[in-house]
């Protein structure tokens, strides 16, 4: 059964997300992918994966993914977030983390966990 995977990366971690997606292109290609706008566009362009894109994170994309979790449309989240940089939409990031926990959705917030999760596919 195909998994519905959301991909998100803060600005300075977008190159790492693109490289990670490239390394796991086969596993990701057999899943339904969702992403915040800029991250999704980069992965689509640079890796060639088909992605349903939401708005950019600061413009509501994080909240749209959270809504997808609440509606049962997202099975797992790969979120390369930068805890060392301030973000104007920090409350949205925290809300997304919270909703994933409430709905028991696996969420990788770093490369090691993302690798473990994609290996489970």
Image: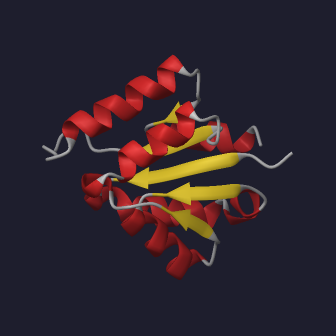
Task: Examine the rendered structure and indicate whether residue 99 appears above or below residue 42.
Answer: above
Whether residue 111 is visible here, answered yes or no, is no
Question: Which quadrant would the C terminus be assigned to in this image?
Answer: top right
How many labels, in total? 0
Quarter of the rendering occupied by the N terminus: top right
Q: Residue at x 57, y 62 (%)?
A: 21
Q: Residue at x 30, y 38 (%)?
A: 93
Whole-percent x and y of residue 84? 18, 40
Q: Nearer the viewer, residue 58 or 20?
A: 58
Residue 86 picture quarter: top left
Q: Which residue is at the front of the view, 108 or 88? A: 88
* Vertical order, 42 against 26 (above or below): below
The residue under the point 37% across, 46% down is 62
Looking at the picture, the colour scheme in use is secondary structure
Residue 50 percent coordinates (x, y): 64, 71
Q: Is residue 1 visible?
A: yes
Determine whether 55 is above or below 4 in the image. below
Q: Point out the residue furthest to the right here.
A: 1
Nearer the observer, 66 or 120:
66
Q: Position of residue 15 (x, y in %)?
A: 39, 66
| Rendered view: 108 above or below 16 | above
């Amino acid at each position: 059964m195909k998994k519905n995977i959301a991909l998100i990366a803060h600005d300075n971690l977008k190159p790492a997300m693109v490289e990670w997606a490239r390394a796991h292109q086969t596993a990701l290609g057999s899943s339904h992918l969702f992403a915040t706008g800029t991250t999704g566009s980069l992965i689509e362009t640079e890796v060639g994966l088909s992605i349903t894109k939401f708005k950019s994170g600061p413009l509501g994309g994080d909240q749209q993914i959270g809504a997808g979790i609440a509606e049962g449309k997202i099975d797992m989240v790969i979120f390369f977030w930068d805890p060392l940089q301030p973000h104007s939409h920090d409350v949205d990031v925290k809300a997304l983390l919270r909703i994933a926990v409430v709905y028991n959705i696996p969420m990788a917030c770093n490369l090691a966990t993302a690798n473990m999760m994609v290996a489970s596919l």
